[in-house]
Image (cartoon, grey):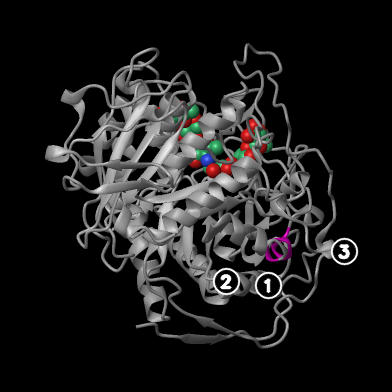
Amino acid sequence: MNAAHKIFLTATALTASLCASSCVQGELDGVRDVVVRTNTTEWRDQIIYQLLTDRFANGDASTDYRLEPGALARYQGGDWQGIVDQLDYLEELGVTALWISPIVLNVDYDAGFDAYHGYWAVDLERLNPHFGDLASLRGFVNAAHERGMLVILDIVTNHMGQIFYYDINGNGQPDETVAGSGGGSPVTRISEYDPDYDPRGIQGWTSLGESGPATIRFFDMPEIFRVRPNPAVLADPSMYNRRGRVTHWDCPGGDAACQSLVREMTLLGDFPGGLKDLDTTRQEVRDVMVDSYVRWVLMTDIDGFRIDTLKHVEYEFWDDFAPRVRERLAAAGKENFFMFGEAFDGDDALIGSYTRPGRLDSVFYFSQKFQVFGDVFQRGGPTDRIRSLYEQRGVNYGTEPQPGGVGVAPRDLLVNFMDNHDVPRFLYDRPDEQGPAAMRAALAYLLTEDGIPCIYYGTEQEYAGGNDPMNREPLWWSGYRTDGETFQWIARLTRIRRGYRALTHGDFELVYTTEATGDAGDAGVVAFERETSEGDYALVVINAQGGHASSMTDAARRNALDASEGTVLVDLLEPETTFTVGAGGAIDVSVGPYQARILVPQDQRTE
Ligand code: ABC
């Protein structure tokens, strides 16, 4: 049952002191009410679309200031009103949940780069005026809900932006270089903005030697919102770990000591670029995160959190944060609130650890991004990799729904993706002529496998940008065309996924994968069944390679189908083609280079 809850906002003009001249003033003026409710019963029905607000669409000229058109590390002008203006486009694409980039006020500018992405928080209770005001954020969420779309907010609990510097030499100004001055000092170059990790905490230094913990000094540059952080407790230096920046993410082949240092740095170090690491073991910090982000849900009625930098925060934080958020929201009438996060790592067991009981509902399936979308679909590796990864699923991921969570076990609800804003786009690594076809085969897999598909904006326009920030192209460069082959392909697949319960709720079982590549008759074949307990059924067969047509030639590798003998299966992507299941559930299906077939029983066909 959906409860509803009203909250009333009192008049304040919080932004007034911080807004740049062109920013919309008085965003919290007046008394307004928001109805907070549970907007979905089932997250497996969703198809997520990831967008960076600054890059998706510019619908509000009043938020256009400090833009550097075409310089992708700077603001480009997108805003929340722009998303509203393009809801037809999104509806035609068939996506159902919009993950937007972080909304809170950021340190606007730092060393030639802008906070257009939103990950440099300075004030967790105010909005980034580049994207609009509270009214436009609410207007966007309402407009999405009116179309049956959900909204997911990106949040960061690990760090703030670059809000202070380490005054290492005690001269009261942030120095780019603290140089040794004779005396054989080992100190040659240290940036006071972003010094390297020191397990003791960043130390002060004079030409006579070390001088104890470096003084922490907050900036006071209101013109770029580089000010003391808010809530006020975050302006207390002891709320930060103060150990300087992470210098190593990994220890390839490294020894135990290296591994333990990397783990420590990951948890306690500043994020490269001087993003100051919060001491998330402090109860005050934990409370601030719960309060600030629950507040945004209650003020806007958004439906889920995408949580940044999971592996940079200790497990105990998630054990505290996730249940408290669920409780607070349930009390306000919002259930099924989806919390999933980013543990950027190829280690499947590590990723899965964030879905253990009491933690998150789901995570991005990074190991799949590397092993399946990378190794198999981009680089033509054997489809057996899909099987070996799948076999880890039940071991590494939570097998029970989170208490008070979204009602589906994490292992059945992983967020699948082939690229995102932190990695080169799929086509960047496949610049050859067959790249788009390979990507469409990958999209067929993404949109028919179990879990929740997540599509990075611009994929539909065949964007091919490389590393950050070149993979964050403005979408308006495409003219929002909807007639391109990949746009149409995604629209077709999303329509099919939404129309067949087998594809959203069915169990997933591999029928065929192969170790073969190249000329082998079955090279590139992956086949799987999806089936619900009510009998909804689909068989998907994909050729992940582009050399030749392939089929399930090795009978010993082929599992018998669940579909009974004589069942006529029709290919939803090529409806004139049918296959009939043979004795003992045997079947052979040929798929051309990069072709996909989605086969459903003739009598279950709905279109
Ligand atoms: C940008 C530029 C910088 C520039 C700076 C001013 O601006 O990239 O070069 O100096 C945000 C912005 C970025 C910005 C940063 C820093 O902030 O979006 O544009 O950098 O200012 C999340 C977000 C991300 C966000 C942040 C910070 C975190 O999605 O958008 O960045 O809030 C790590 C983190 C991960 C983080 C990611 C960017 O970096 O863990 O949370 N993403 C290895 C490590 C990973 C690491 C990854 C980075 O490298 O293990 O921890 O991610 O490339 C596999 C291995 C993996 C390995 C990969 C590469 O290979 O199994 O472990 O990942 O095989």
Q: Hey, what amino acid is under mark 3?
A: Ser
Q: Which mark is residue 21?
A: 3
x and y percentages locating residue 143 in the rendered image: 63, 73
**The magenta stretch spans residue 108:** no
Tell me the crowding category of disc 1: few under 14, some 14 to 19, or many 20 or more residues within 10 angstroms, Cα based.
many
Quadrant containing ligand 1: top right
Q: Which mark is residue 147?
A: 2
Ligand 1 contact, mark 3 (Cβ < 8 Å): no
Q: Kindly state the secondary structure of the residue where label 3 is placed.
A: loop
Q: Residue at x 56, y 29 (%)?
A: 196
Left or right for 110, reference 410 = right
Q: Residue at x 47, y 35 (%)?
A: 441
- Front residue of 579/161: it is 579
Q: Nearer the viewer, mark 3 or mark 1?
A: 1
Residue sitting farthest toward the right = 21
Q: Nearer the viewer, mark 2 or mark 1?
A: 2
